Each structure stands twice: as C-alpha cells, then as structure tokens.
Amino acid sequence: MDKLASAGRMLIFNVVVAALGGFLFGYDTAVISGCEQQIQKIFGLSGFLHGAVASACVWGCVAGALLGGRLTDAVGRKASLFSCAVMYFVTALTSGFAFGPWDLMASRFFGGVAVGVSSIAAPVYIAEISPPERRGTLGGLFQINIIVGMIASQLANWGIESLHLGDATWRWMLGAMVVPAAVFMALVPFIKESESWKRMKSAPPAMKTERVGGLFSRQNFMLLFLAVSISAYDQLSGINAVMYFAVRIFQMAGCAESTALAVTACMSAISCIGTVLGLVLIDRIGRRKLIITGLSGCVLAHFGCAAGFASNAGFLASACVFVFVVFYQLGQGVVLWVFLSELFPTRLRSQGQSTGIFVNWVCAAALTMVLPIFFERCPPWMIFSFFGVCLVTMIFWAVFLMPETKGKELE
C-alpha cells in the first residue's frame, strides 16, 4: 500500500514538473503582448519590423518543433526538458538586457526554440508515464500550465506597468521570466526518465522497425494527416491572435491601455474555467465530442465578436473574446496536446508530434507576422469573421475524420 502511494506521489511530481514546461511556454509566448507597443514606439519600428519582433519567439518555436522530436528521441525526454529550462533562463536575461531590435529578436528566437522543444518533450513524457485511464487528465495539465503561465506573465506585466518605470518597462517585463525558469531548472533533475523511451533505446534494431513504417510511409499517412491538420486548425482558430495582441484588441474595443492590461489578465484567468472543464470531461466523454463542443462555442463567439466590432459595440466584442477563449480551452486547448501524444506509436511519437507542432508554429509565426499589418489595414470584424469561417470547416473535420483515442493503449 505504501509503495502504491509512493508511486502515485512520484507520478504526480513527475507530471507537475514536466508541466512546468507548459507554464514557461505560456509565459514566454504571452509576455510580448504587454510590451509590444512600447517596443515599437521606443525603437521606431515599421509595421514589418514590429511584426518581426513580435513573431521572433514564434519562429523560434518553429525551429524548436522541427528539431525537438529528434532531440527527445536521441537524448531522452528528461535531458530535453532540462535543456529547455536552461534556454528559458538565459534568453530571459538576454531579452531584458537587449540593446536594440535585432539582438532582442535573437533572444526571443532562442527562447522560442525552448518553447518548441518543450511543446514536444513535455506532452510526450507525460503521456508515456501516465496510466491510460488518467492520461487525458494528466496530459491536460500541460495545457492548464500554459494558461497559468499566460496569466502569470500578464499579471506581472500589469504589476510592472503600475511601477511607472518609463522606457525600462519592457525590459522588466521580458526579464521577469528568470524566476520561473530558475525553478524549472532546479526541479527537472529530480524527475524519472520515461520507461517507454528507455525500452525504445534498448530494443534491437530489428524490433524498432517491426510492424512500424517510417513517419512518411503510406501506412502512416492518415496519422500524419490528422496531426498536421489539427495543428494547422489550432492556429486558424485565432487563439494566438487573441493572446499575442489582446491588449491591442481590447483597446480597439474602447479600453484604455492600463485597463486593457488588466482585462487581458482577467481574460486569461477566466479561460482557466474552460481548461478545468476540459480536464474533467476529456476522459469521460472523449476527445472527439469535447473538441466538437468547444469548436461550436468558438464559432458563435467569433461571429459575435465580429458583430460587436461592426456595430461599434465594444462591450459585446470584448465579452465574445472572453467566451471564445473559454470554449477554445475547453476543446482545442486541452485536446490538441493529448490527441497528438496518443496518435503515434512510441517509435514515431516524438517525430510525429514534432511534425504536427512544427506546422502549428509555422502557422502561428506567419499569422503573428502579418497580423500587425492586418490590424492597420482591415477592420477587426473582418479578422474575427475569417477565424469563424475557418472553425466551421474544422467542425466538419472533427465530425467526419477525427478518430477517438480515449482509453487506448499507446502501442
């Protein structure tokens, strides 16, 4: 009995520490929303350069996702997580001490590499150490940590803004991430390595190729298609457009800058409601029903937001942004990471997830790059309508193509 209790505590410890990679993921990607306008003003950036600075972290995520699968297979899940922790710590310091837009872009890029690698290593690690009946809930802790990280960054931004530090405000906002990065770096050495990874590395070469073709082989085409399509749709939902440019969006809806910062922090806090509901439901009703429910709410919220902006009803537009993030977290936010980590067999899991997340971050980077231009040239109702139409097509994808992975053995 004591051994079972001890094993249970160790499982929770391992999952919670790995999920801290999600916390830093959320913190690093969301922190820019509080200071992107000040950075643009201080450095006198054009719309293109502004987009480049804002998207530098996301392009780093693309690179991290591209090499993350091979890295986690080569050195292990634990070592990959530790390398991410070190990079988070170093790039937080270099971002805060950046001298100009180019070295800031470089720091944000390498911070993004850490996000990209952790977005593969942490979900795969959690899936491999979790029992099948709890895999959805435990895997969903990665997503809730992303949200908590976003909330923490926005609250930190709000608090730093209230200190009236002048032109140094953005430096403190970006540099504050050294604190959670140091905690993550201190805890990762105490987690256990994935037994699935150990078995994969110790298996004879003949067994590694038995019954499993290559990632891009014909027999795995459908798995790859599902991973790529759910990842692309995740960005076409508009979630990162809302999270990265939340302050700007609420200002367009009529909020003052300080109020917009506070509203953005509240939005992320309220989105936790959706994440918690998703964690409760994912192992009960399954991945497919949950994502369809979330998508339906997102579609209604997007079109409601478009109507609010089109009619100059700022309160309606702001309220619908809140509704959107709740339903996104309920559906896609929780399901994406769990579904990708369950879709592939062990030998292909890291590389399969790497390919899906690579597509996700390419779409995120492209959108982040062009959104400042669209915000300058297009009315916001048009942007939200576009995202609504995209999610209507995803509902058809989920109904007719998405398989249910609830309770299935990973092998």
Image (cartoon, rainbow, N blue to C red):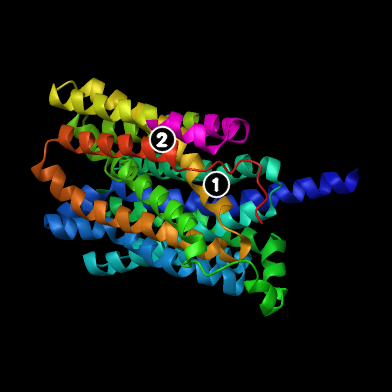
The range drawn in magenta is 275-295
Secondary element at image label 2: helix
Residue at the (88%, 49%) spot, across then down: 3
- Pick whichever, 245 or 92, lies toward us: 245
Q: Could you tell me how far apart the alpha carbons at marks 2 and 1 are, in whole angstroms? A: 15 Å
Of mark 2 and mark 1, the one earlier in the sequence is: 2
Residue that numbered label 1 is attached to: 338
Secondary structure predominantly adopted by residues drawn in magenta: helix
Identify the disc placed on residue 328.
2
- Pick whichever, 306 or 261, lies toward us: 306
Residue at the (53%, 54%) spot, across then down: 21
Kind of residue sitting beneath label 1: Val
Most extreme residue toward the front is 218
- Pick whichever, 99 or 232, lies toward us: 232
Residue 95 at x, y = what percent?
Answer: 34, 62
Count neighbours of disc 2 (C-alpha within 10 A) and say few if under 14, some if 14 to 19, many if 20 or more.
Answer: many
